[in-house]
Image (cartoon, helix red, strand yellow):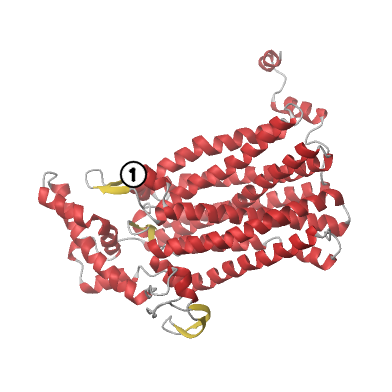
Amino acid sequence: MIDMLVVDLSRWQFAATAMYHFIFVPLTLGLSFMMAIMESVYVMTGRDVWRKATLFWGTLFGVNFAMGVATGIVMEFQFGMNWSYYSHYVGDVFGAPLAIEGLMAFFLEATFVGLFFFGWDRLSKVGHLVVTWLVAFGANFSALWILIANGWMQNPVGAKFNPDTMRMEITDFMAVIFNSVAQAKFVHTVSAGYVCGAIFVLSISALFLVKGKHVEMAKRSAVVAASFGLASALSVVVLGDESGYVATEHQIMKVSALEAAFHTEPAPAPWTILAIPGEDGEPVWSLSVPWVGGLITTRSLDKELPGIHELVDRAQDRIRSGMVAYEALKQIRADGSNAEARAVFEETWPDLGYGLLLKRYRDDVQNATDEEIVQAAEDTVPDVWPLFWTFRIMMGLGFFFIAFFGLWFYRASRGWIDTNKPLLWFTVFLLPTPWIAIESGWFIAEFGRQPWVVEGVLPTFYAASGLQVMDLVLSLTFFVLLYTVLLVIMVMLMVRIIKAGPKEKLFTNDDEDDFVITTLPATPATKELGS
């Protein structure tokens, strides 16, 4: 039988490392393009204030980028350590975009990050500008391939289960790349990162303006952040709507849980603003807007949004089909030449994952009782109310950001950047909010997919490694403590950089000499290398 404590601890560990990692990723995405925009203005105008701005925000970008790399590496090792059967089952598909991300995107970004920092006095203005834009594109290419991999987990297209190798294998790589869920997730995620970068720049600029420091750089940075942020905030809401519509097509249970829609409503369904759950988990009171839910989720007036109870009934049918697929798979494994079993499996294999849900209750899936089938079907319902409220927090912040950036854009267009101190202080204290929205979005995406690690293909509990509980407790504690220390160090470094303010150049000649001497101590080998 499955040890669910091991599964839960494995999930907690991956969730903790992923949430910490994604503190750094969105700021990297947002700052990279804002750096490129500011340096473009510097190259076009030749005004030194834009060079200072690029150097200042670039330094903060560098610290954040380094922390993102350090925390991201651990996540990939966990696929083999904590989720070994997942790696075996879908590694042929999942590994491809991760490998391409490393070769095509991360190396591009990491290489040009070095040129960005050390190439200011060694490259021409245009040459260095090209480097900065390549850093920005590399960051976004990294996000693209990671989200293609994640999007496949949400909507596993372009692949098929091979009964001979017992693995999912790619049948159409273009379908994996152009997966509608992956593309919608990518544009929505990077837009959220741009909002994060814009609020970060705007908040720090507002702090400078309140204190009367580095005013010229702060004003120009605020103008760029307000413009870039408004476009990004509008994109987040529009692309978030697209992401939700795609989820309705491929992850309908998640959407019904987000809306706390336990029963199928006549089309078009209402949209619930607020609700209070009762003892049975269903809402006993709700405040709804007619038609809006159906228009958002189905984009029609005549399509119904199925309720959770109806979807559970559908899951029972797929579980029974999965039992047939499981039995056929056993026959194929016993006799690979059994053509009849292969024909049955070919017809029913898309439901094999639903049959595997029964592994939580018994090993001989094909002999499951009606009660066990009902239990397994009910397991397809994620925890509704955490999803319901988290979604509304995320969505509320999304619309707030549009109004916030709209106000700043209006004031910037009138030259009223530093004339309202309450607004400046409000902007400073708004700094954590984009991370709240972003982490909420990832919670919805991943928690809402449960009980699947790959939607409809592989249950989460079936993908975990057979580790010991104490090993997971120790490693989870270690990672949380380590990542917390790293986060504190990063915040301290960034506070120190912000207090120091912009510089004329990143390194003086003395700094560069000290760097070389420190990293290459004087030995016969290094003297020969130096000569």
- Residue extending furthest toward the front: 301
Q: Is residue 243 above or below residue 285?
A: above
Amino acid of disc 1: Asp
Q: Is residue 17 above or below residue 308?
A: above
Camera-side residue of 92 and 128: 128
Q: Which residue is labeled 1 in the image?
A: 172
Q: Is residue 88 left or right of residue 21?
A: left
- Residue extending furthest toward the right: 212
Which quarter of the image is occupied by the N terminus?
Answer: bottom left
Residue 430 seen by the camera: no
Crowd tier of the residue under label 1, counting other residues whose Cα lies within 10 Å: few below 14, some 14–19, many 20 or above: few
Residue appearing at x 50%, y 38% in the figure: 102
In the rendered image, residue 408, in percent from the top left (x then y), is placed at 75, 62
In the rendered image, residue 81, in percent from the top left (x then y), is placed at 42, 47
Q: Secondary structure at mark 1?
A: loop
Q: Is residue 3 above or below residue 213?
A: below
Which quarter of the image is occupied by the C terminus?
Answer: top right
In the rendered image, residue 265, in percent from the top left (x then y), is placed at 39, 80
Residue appearing at x 74%, y 44% in the figure: 38
Q: Is residue 507 left or right of residue 280?
A: right
Q: Is residue 287 left or right of residue 210?
A: left
Camera-side residue of 114 and 176: 176
Q: Is residue 12 above or below residue 67?
A: below
